[in-house]
Image (cartoon, rainbow, N blue to C red):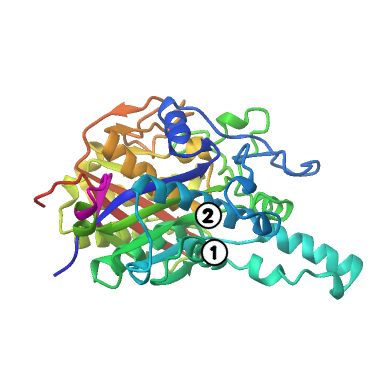
Amino acid sequence: MKKRVVITGIGLITPLGIGVKDTWTALCSGRSGISEITKFDTAGFTTKFAGEVKNFDPKNFLLKKDANKVQLFIAYAIAATAEAIKDSELKIDTFNADKVGVITGCGLGGLGLLEKSASTLKKKGPQKISPFFIPMLIGNMAPGMISIYFGAKGPNSSVATACAAGTHAIGDAFKIIQTGRAEAMIAGGIESVITPLGLAGFNSMKALSTRNNEPQKASRPFEKDRDGFVMGEGGGILIMETLESAIKRNAKIYAEIAGYGMSGDAYHFTAPAPDGSGAADCMNAAIKDAEITPNMIDYINAHGTSTPLNDLSETIAVKKIFGNHAYNLAISSTKSMTGHLLGGSGGIETAFTALSIFEKIIPATINYENKDKDCDLDYVPNIARKKEINFAMKNSFGFGGTNAALILKKYNEKH
């Protein structure tokens, strides 16, 4: 018999704030976390803004010996995990350590370190490369360091499926608990690649917005004048555990995870399938896994990147799966406020979806000014909406045509 899996803890490090309280307050008020880049000089770059995490000091979360050598994506992971564990009041000790695992998603890992080290190699030679270069570069060091810091000895893995990575990580963790291979999992997504190379690469693809005169209005998912996505950084970590464990601990339950779907577009290495078929297959798989019908979904936290192709493709996919019910759904993209955290987006956005269910509030899609005739659904424009949510869907789609979807539901003790 499949075990029921619930979310009992949330940790967030985002462009909107350090911690759940600050982030959620900003999100519900419709405040943008996007501003001019301060990490490096953007002279010569087509795009000059991003969703940076502000006022984050690794020394507040890491041991002194680690604070100056770990990359930001790892520091974000540890900080978000610390908050999530505190929130859940989950104790990891010798009695349960082997039953608590870690899975995180990350797209590019320590890209900034790679840039700096390549420059060092060229200017000063191979003897000047740090012995910490390789271990601090790789994405799986995030779950590794979480395990080391918090003592979780259960299943440990890292997912690198581009912009779907955080959602895949949570979905994989869900299945590990559901099938009894762990009692609890620390799972989510993190990313920190607002670097010269990262920005230049996405600019070269013409994937980013260039609305430099209005950075806070640049991310405008599903809106007629959208011109590309906005890079973001940070992390979102969830504590997930069996319902039995949560009840035994008398833990707060934000939401239950009911379904998980995956698919591939088999179409193009960066563009989504224009007919939305891959995304639709993924959503359908999640709905079937949850053993519900499409018309039971009340809200979709969309992938909604603010690119012309993605938003249209996702809209088409929603119509394929939901039919007439597509027009009854509330759909919003919180990337309008946080920017796109790439591999970290599924982590923070699944957390937002759980909070929406728990708090009965749907965050808005801000900067929605002019309707796109081809994107004609209810995108919760500009103002957050109070709404009872029984079932919600979280979508994430990545380069290479890799897709992930989760179904979350309002917790009900009986079913």
The picture quadrant where one finds residue 24 is top left
Residue that numbered label 1 is attached to: 145
Res 342 visible:
no
Q: Position of residue 62 (x, y in %)?
A: 60, 53
Res 38 visible:
yes
Estimate how packed mark 1 is, as few (under 14), some (14 to 19) or many (20 or more) residues with alpha carbons within 10 Å.
some
Circle 1 SS class: helix
Identity of the residue drawn at 79% across and 42% down: 41
Residue that numbered label 2 is attached to: 78
Is 64 displayed left or right of 285 in the figure? right
Question: Viewer-proximal residue, 105 or 252?
Answer: 252
Question: Viewer-proximal residue, 253 or 170?
Answer: 253
> What is the magenta range?
248-258
Question: Viewer-proximal residue, 384 or 318?
Answer: 384
Choose the circle earlier in sequence order: 2 or 1.
2
Q: Amino acid at mark 1?
A: Met
Identity of the residue drawn at 19% across and 64% down: 3
Q: Position of residue 312 (x, y in %)?
A: 42, 46
Is 25 displayed left or right of 51 in the figure? left
Give yes or no for contact between labels 2 and 1 (Cβ–Cβ under 8 Å).
yes
Q: Amino acid at mark 2?
A: Ile
